[in-house]
Image: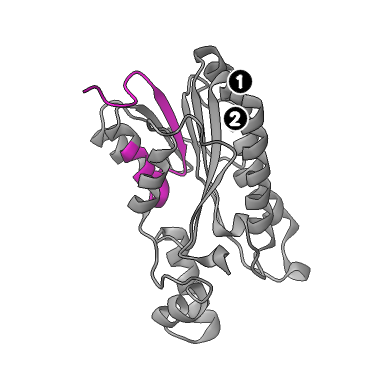
Amino acid sequence: MSPVLQGKKALVTGAGSGIGAAVARRLADDGAAVYVVDIDAGKVEPLAAEYGAVEAIGCDLSDLAAVDRLPADVDILVNNAGRQHVSRLEEFDPEMFSQILRIMLEAPFRLVRRMLPHMYGRGWGRVVNISSAHGLRASPYKSAYVSAKHGLEGLSKVTALEGAEHGVTSNCINPAYVRTPLVEAQIADQAAAHGISEDEVVEKIMLTPVAVKRLIEPAETAELAALLWGPASNSITGSSLTQDGGWTAR
């Protein structure tokens, strides 16, 4: 049996590690030719070497002109790249706020806008937005991240409504804390700030709102993403698939 994505191209942002790398590998395993994009091209070059049909691209998504130069011949777009900054609203650096929104909301908009004509022309396309439990809930001190993820949820739904007649679906995946470099950096920062161990940060801060008391592994999120480009995906659109250990059940 031929791979489910044979003859299709995918693009994954933030593919240098964590969820992005796991999703890129899953796409390649399903037969797609994958553009792996990261701010540090050196991080995605080993992934490209691992899979012959993968092209490594360095791109700073906060540079929107550079975003507009990324490939447009894409059948599956995975908007994954992100960054975090924790600060009280009255102390939050406005430029940092703007940069986070450019990376996590404006860049996904530009990529969707750039790639939809190709998807429409083929009568098939998949937009997979790696959102977060913070796309559905808020936490203090994360105003930019929460705002960007909430905006991504809205963009995803509009893409779903406009793309439906063209065979294009658009969905969000909403994990709780995933074991990624971004989360590991947060653990270290919070341990230093609160004067507690990193294990206590995970247990007493990060896992407090979730019922399943564990961090999610990137490969788990990649498996959920595969549902959204697989055989069962035709009528899954405009949805937010929670993988949050029960966070939003409260």
- Which residue corresponds to the image point at 53% horizontal and 66% vertical from the top-left? 247
Residue at the left extreme of this rendering: 1
Foreground residue, 200 or 102?
A: 200
Foreground residue, 245 or 249?
A: 249
* Mark 2 closeness class: few <14, some 14–19, many ≥20 residues within 10 Å: many
Residue at the top extreme of this rendering: 121
Residue 51: give x, y in percent of width and height.
Answer: 26, 32
172 in relation to 89, above or below: above
Residue 150: give x, y in percent of width and height.
Answer: 66, 51
126 in relation to 99, above or below: above
Foreground residue, 42 or 197?
A: 197
Q: Does the magenta segment cover residue 175?
A: no
Q: Which quarter of the rendering shows the C terminus?
A: bottom right
- Please give the range of residues in magenta: 1-26
- Which residue corresponds to the image point at 38% horizontal and 39% vertical from the top-left? 226
Would you say residue 207 is visible in this rendering? Answer: yes
- Which residue corresponds to the image point at 35% horizontal and 52% vertical from the top-left? 220
Residue 80: give x, y in percent of width and height.
Answer: 50, 44
Q: Which residue is mark 2?
A: 112
Is residue 66 shown left or right of residue 34? right
Is residue 145 shown left or right of residue 186? right
Q: CA distance from mark 1 to mark 2?
A: 16 Å
* Mark 1 closeness class: few <14, some 14–19, many ≥20 residues within 10 Å: few
Q: Which residue is mark 1?
A: 165
Q: Which quarter of the rendering shows the N terminus?
A: top left
The amino acid type found where label 2 is placed reads Val
Q: Does the magenta segment cover residue 15?
A: yes
Residue at the right extreme of this rendering: 90
Residue 130: give x, y in percent of width and height.
Answer: 51, 46
Label 1 sits on a secondary structure element that is: helix
Is residue 66 shown left or right of residue 214? right
Residue 221 is tagged as: none
